[in-house]
Image: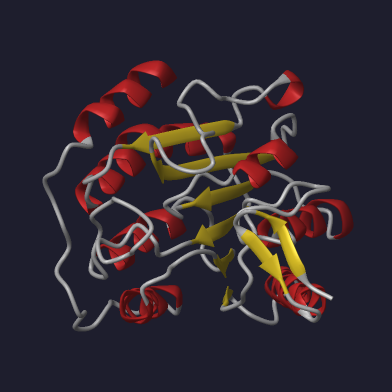
């Protein structure tokens, strides 16, 4: 009949059905791209997924969509070395947990720190056979797109190059936008096409599937998605609603993560 699963996650009678439809869209998109029927895909689905654990819903998330896509790619479609990049403002604790000991999945997360759910320190790097395949870039409130790009170039790119992924799956939350009511990062719609270009360059061309995660200011969400879509179809972004951002307090955190990786 619906109700609260936890203080943040409320469901109605059809929520599980809707979550299955969203996860099914993910499975369909991955199959199409892997099978050559599509070059890239953007799954505009809700509810989001990256907080959901293997056996527990949390943080607005019922099923972990990107984990479903990665597991399908590896277990049923025979792929290996899948890169997951999560630029949602919250750390994807569920995705990290699912793949923490998996050497076939490199999980990279950009997120505000400290913030819900309290995970995602830079020294969380994986365990057992998956040690070294988790890379967290926690950023302080007020950090801008400049710091995302610096981290991608200086910290993420060398790790990804060593991993040599065949595919990239993206947890694309747009709640790092400065207008978002739940968070404190300071990105604009103009930052997302630049970030997207960098992320797509981390894997071979035409091997990307993107999944919508958070984003709770509807105007900012609209503008950010609209700025991102041209990059996914191989076009230069046209006129965007906002200019890219720079400055802010995130530079030191990039240096800390870079030093830790060294």
**Quadrant housing residue 100:** top right
Closest to the observer, 123 or 47: 47
Closest to the observer, 7 or 236: 7
Is residue 262 in view from this perspective?
A: no
Counting from the top left corner in percent of width and height, residue 188 is at: 23, 65
- Apparent side of residue 8 relative to residue 175 in the rendered image (left or right): right
Q: Is residue 42 above or below residue 195?
A: below
How many marks do you count on the picture? Answer: 0
Counting from the top left corner in percent of width and height, residue 130 is at: 70, 27
Q: Residue shown at 41%/79% (left/top)?
A: 229
Q: Residue shown at 62%/53% (left/top)?
A: 7
Counting from the top left corner in percent of width and height, residue 159 is at: 48, 32
Is residue 13 in view from this perspective?
A: yes
Counting from the top left corner in percent of width and height, residue 13 is at: 81, 79
Q: Residue shown at 17%/73% (left/top)?
A: 242
Of the 4 image quadrants, the one containing the C terminus is top left
Q: Which residue lies furthest to the right in this view?
A: 76
**Quadrant housing residue 114:** top left
- Apparent side of residue 105 relative to residue 216 in the rendered image (left or right): right
Of the 4 image quadrants, the one containing the N terminus is bottom right
Closest to the observer, 61 or 26: 61
- Apparent side of residue 54 relative to residue 213 in the rendered image (left or right): right
Q: How is the image coloured?
A: secondary structure
Q: Is residue 105 above or below residue 75?
A: above
- Apparent side of residue 71 relative to residue 142 in the rendered image (left or right): right
Closest to the observer, 82 or 37: 82
Q: Residue shown at 64%/39% (left/top)?
A: 96
């Amino acid at each position: 009949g619906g109700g609260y699963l936890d203080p943040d996650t409320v469901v109605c009678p059809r929520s599980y059905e809707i979550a299955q439809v969203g996860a099914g869209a993910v499975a369909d998109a991955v199959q199409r791209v892997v099978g050559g029927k599509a070059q890239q895909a953007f799954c505009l689905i809700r509810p989001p997924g990256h907080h959901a654990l293997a056996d527990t819903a949390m943080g607005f998330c019922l099923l972990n969509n990107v984990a479903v896509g990665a597991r399908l790619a590896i277990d049923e479609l025979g792929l290996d070395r899948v890169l997951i990049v999560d630029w949602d403002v919250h750390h994807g604790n569920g995705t990290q947990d699912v793949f923490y000991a998996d050497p076939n999945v490199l999980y990279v997360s950009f997120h505000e720190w400290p913030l819900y759910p309290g995970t995602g320190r830079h020294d969380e790097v994986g365990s057992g056979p998956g040690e070294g395949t988790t890379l967290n870039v926690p950023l302080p409130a007020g950090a801008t797109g400049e710091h995302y790009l610096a981290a991608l170039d200086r910290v993420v790119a060398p790790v990804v190059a060593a991993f040599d992924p065949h595919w990239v799956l993206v947890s694309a939350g747009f709640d790092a936008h400065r207008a978002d009511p739940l968070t404190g990062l300071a990105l604009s719609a103009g930052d997302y096409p630049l970030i997207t270009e960098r992320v797509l360059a981390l894997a071979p061309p035409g091997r990307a599937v993107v999944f919508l995660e958070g984003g709770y200011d509807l105007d900012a969400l609209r503008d950010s998605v609209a700025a991102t879509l041209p990059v996914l179809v191989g076009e230069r972004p046209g006129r965007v609603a906002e200019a890219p951002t720079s400055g802010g307090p995130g530079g030191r955190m990039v240096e800390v993560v870079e030093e830790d990786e060294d």
